[in-house]
Image (cartoon, rainbow, N blue to C red):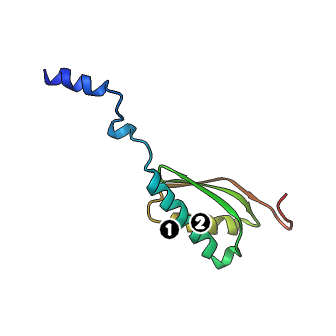
Amino acid sequence: MAAALGLLGACSGQPTRAEAPPDQPADARVQARVQAAIADDPGLNGRMIDVSVAGGIVHLSGFVQSTYDLLLVQGDARTVHGVRAVDERQLVIIRGGTPP
């Protein structure tokens, strides 16, 4: 009987712990903290970096002027509590110019 109830619960359409949707309020807090950390980094001179967060994974996009700047942005994001991983594949390094 208990097994049958367990199967019934599994088919109820309710998300299980493993399928739970990302905690959107927590993601919004992490996003705000990462944006603040990047904005407050004097080495980045106020670079405009777009930040989005889903399930604690930070996605960064935008333009930086060097590999060093890229490392600064990554480091700033990683220092924020609640960040599980950082995806910086959408950060583009431009040397000696301005972004398009």
Label 2 crowd (10 A; few <14 / some 14-19 / many >=20): many
Q: Tell me: 68 left or right of 82.
A: right
Question: Which residue corresponds to the image point at 14% horizontal and 25% vertical from the top-left?
Answer: 2
Quadrant holding the N terminus:
top left
For label 1, the residue is 79
Q: Tell me: 18 left or right of 61.
A: left
Question: Which residue corresponds to the image point at 47% horizontal and 49% vertical from the top-left?
Answer: 55
State the count of labels.
2
Q: Amino acid at mark 1?
A: Thr
Can you give x and y, in whole percent of width and height, for residue 10 in the image? 29, 27
For label 2, the residue is 35
Residue that extends furthest to the left in the rendered view of this protein: 1
Question: Which residue corresponds to the image point at 80% horizontal and 61% vertical from the top-left?
Answer: 94
Quick one: label 2 or label 1, which is nearer the N terminus?
2
Foreground mark, 2 or 1?
A: 2
- Above or below — where is 4 with respect to 61? above
SS for callout 1: loop
Can you give x and y, in whole percent of width and height, for residue 29 in the image? 48, 61
Q: Is residue 19 visible?
A: yes
- Above or below — where is 87 with respect to 44? above
Can you give x and y, in whole percent of width and height, for residue 80 in the image? 49, 66
Which quadrant of the view contains residue 48?
bottom right
Can you give x and y, in whole percent of width and height, for residue 78 in the image? 52, 64
Question: Which residue corresponds to the image point at 59% horizontal and 66% vertical from the top-left?
Answer: 35
Quadrant holding the C terminus:
bottom right
